[in-house]
Amino acid sequence: MCKNMKQSSNIFLIGPMGAGKTTVGRQLSKCLDIQFYDSDREIEIRTGVDIPVVFEYEGEVGFRRRECSILSELTQLDSIVLATGGGAILLPENRRCLRANGFVVYLRCIVDRQLERTLKDVHRPLLNTENPREKLESLMRIRTPLYESCADYTVDTGRLSSRMAVKHILNIFQSSRSTCKN
């Protein structure tokens, strides 16, 4: 149960856009009474512009550079819940920071559900394409193995409500922490 648990009090959420990382993260932080961070939101706060503007001016490479810096900083904090961006796991250094400093939970979600949840969201620069389904499927082919390799635990948020996902995560997180202490 403790495969990558480092006695950390941090929970890091990874997964595709529309998987519910922010929603689940907020609920987890409330249940645990610890600070919640969203890496995309932190980038927006520090740059003073939203993510699509960062993509417009700096491209995905510039955005990923900012994301790496934010993740390096946030993963050093104690007792936090962190929702990462969907592509945060693309860089090896991000995966190392996540695995080394917290309990990493992959929120798995099928493409149909992602489409439902992101259909009207204009703040998803990677979905500004003629065929969002094709884009999501392409991203999943590339990213799924990375999510799986980084995760301590996986929850299917395409099937579970956010409340049930939180319950599952809390159960496994708390049991893994108590098992590791013995």
Image (spheres, grey):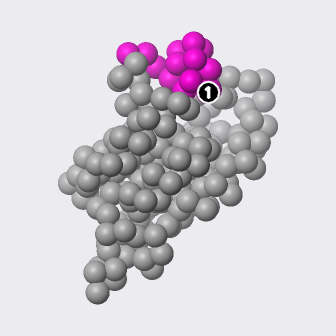
> In screen coordinates, is 169 left or right of 91?
left
The residue lying toward the viewer, choosing from 147 and 58, is: 58
Residue 26 percent coordinates (x, y): 33, 46
* Residue that appears at 33% across and 49% down: 76
- Identity of the amino acid at label 1? Val
| Residue 49 is inside the magenta segment | yes
Q: Nearer the viewer, residue 99 or 45?
A: 99
Which residue is more in the foreground, 84 or 77? 77
Which residue is labeled 1 in the image?
A: 61
Q: Check the picture and name the quadrant holding the N terminus.
A: bottom left
Horizontally, is 156 left or right of 166 in the view? Answer: right
Quadrant, the C terminus? bottom left
For the point 44% across and 35% down, which residue is it? 69
**Image position of 182 with respect to 129: above or below:** below
The residue that appears at 32% across and 74% down in the rendered structure is 177
172 is within the stretch colored magenta? no
